[in-house]
Image (cartoon, helix red, strand yellow):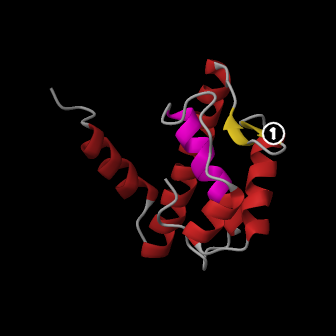
Amino acid sequence: MFEHLDPRSPTPLYAQIANRVRVAIAAGELHPATALPSVRQLAAQLRVNPATVVQAYRDLETDGFVEMRQGAGTFVREVAPAGRARERARQAAALVHEMLAQAGRLGVSRQELQAAIAEEIGVGTP
């Protein structure tokens, strides 16, 4: 779940970690009451400062995705289907934003991009 974190990204590492957990919860890969790795375990695995993991977990707790229990760990909370749907929609918008930015850097027009998307998803094909 945490592979491909990019330390050179403009997105801070804690936000990348939190985002991966949000995606896993929204996609149903992480279920309610599932224990996340301890702060120390995850920091060692990712080779980051434990404070980075603490910040990610705190952000997730603030957003209602996890519950931090003193001395017991961090656990996935029950997220209502509407909340998971909102997160998937937010992730979809982020993907589109990134795709448009990448297309702009490559000089791909919006029309070319729309045609490529339509072809990829099979719009207009029987």
The answer to whether residue 92 is above or below residue 106 is above
Neighbor class of circle 1 (other Cα within 10 Å; few <14, some 14-19, many 20+) is few
Picture residue at 81% right of the left edge, 45% below the top: 71
Left or right of 119? Residue 31 is: right
Q: Nearer the viewer, residue 80 or 85?
A: 80
Picture residue at 72% right of the left edge, 74% below the top: 49
Asked where in the image residue 123 lies, by quadrant, the reply is top left
Q: Nearer the viewer, residue 97 or 107?
A: 97
Left or right of 40? Residue 31 is: left
18 part of magenta stretch: yes
Q: Nearer the viewer, residue 21 or 82?
A: 21
The stretch of residues the image draws in magenta is 17-27
Q: Which of 52 and 112 is in front in this view?
A: 52
Picture residue at 54% right of the left edge, 36% below the top: 30
The residue tagged 1 is 69
Picture residue at 50% right of the left edge, 34% below the top: 27
Which quarter of the image is occupied by the C terminus?
A: top left
Amino acid at circle 1: Arg
Left or right of 52? Residue 36 is: left
Q: Position of residue 37 (x, y in %)?
A: 61, 51
- Which element is circle 1 on? strand
Q: Residue furthest front?
A: 71
Q: Where is residue 33 in the image (x, y as percent from the top left)?
A: 64, 29
Q: Where is residue 12 in the image (x, y as percent from the top left)?
A: 71, 68
Q: Please, what is the dominant secondary structure of the magenta stretch?
A: helix
